[in-house]
Amino acid sequence: MRQHYRMVLSQSRRMLGVTEDAEDVAQSVFIKAWQSWADFEGNEAQRRAWLLRITRNATIDAARKRTLRRMGPLDTLLEERTAQVLSSPDFEGDVILARLHAAISTLPPKQRWVFQARYFDDRPYADLALETGTSEGALKASYHHARKKIESILLLELESQVF
């Protein structure tokens, strides 16, 4: 747990945007991992991928429960989420980066996970495929669709001079 806690927490916090929720997810991840740790057979890289898969699934479940994709006007939703990002003590950035995070938060959880892993962490598709049990081609498609959605959201926002 000591070795992987920061990794699990940061992956979950980036997706959920709320430290307390990410801490709850991390706790549940390590409970699940502890229950199966002795049965796991594999090297350290495989163990890390396995732990990240548990993290991903638990984080996506938490995101769904929080109904992060609530309905409403997109501009209002982006304003609320930008304010939330800017007020977070974990956020270090400007308004433009906060807008990017707000746009990312509107993605479906699986696309959000892939986008953040590739865009912010520059993680290879091969590693993500191990963690998710998804083909590299499907992950590339998810990343592409996520990028296009974010671009269109930010362009709409720019056109409406919200920036």
Image (cartoon, helix red, strand yellow):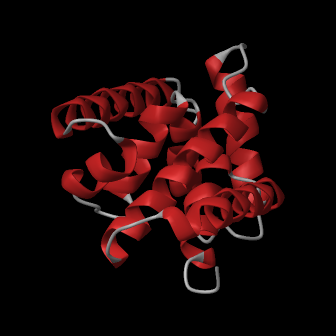
Locate the N terminus and report the quarter of the image it occupies. Answer: bottom right
- The answer to which of 138 and 18 lies nearer the viewer is 138
Residue at 23 percent across and 30 percent down: it is: 138
Locate the C terminus and report the quarter of the image it occupies. Answer: top right
Taking the image as shown, residue 142 lies to the left or right of residue 106, namely: left
The answer to whether one can see residue 4 in this image is yes
Residue at 73 percent across and 54 percent down: it is: 25
- The answer to which of 71 and 139 lies nearer the viewer is 139
Residue furthest out toward the left: 137
Residue 44 x/y as whole percent: 36, 77
Task: Choose top left, top right, bottom left or bottom right for residue 37.
Answer: bottom right
Residue at 42 percent across and 69 percent down: it is: 48
The answer to whether one can see residue 95 in this image is no
Taking the image as shown, residue 44 lies to the left or right of residue 140, namely: right
Residue 158 x/y as whole percent: 46, 32
Residue furthest out toward the bottom: 2
Residue at 34 percent across and 66 percent down: it is: 46
Residue 57 x/y as whole percent: 56, 42
- The answer to which of 17 and 45 lies nearer the viewer is 45
Looking at the rendered structure, the number of numbered marks drawn on it comes to: 0
Q: In this picture, is 150 found above or below 95?
A: above
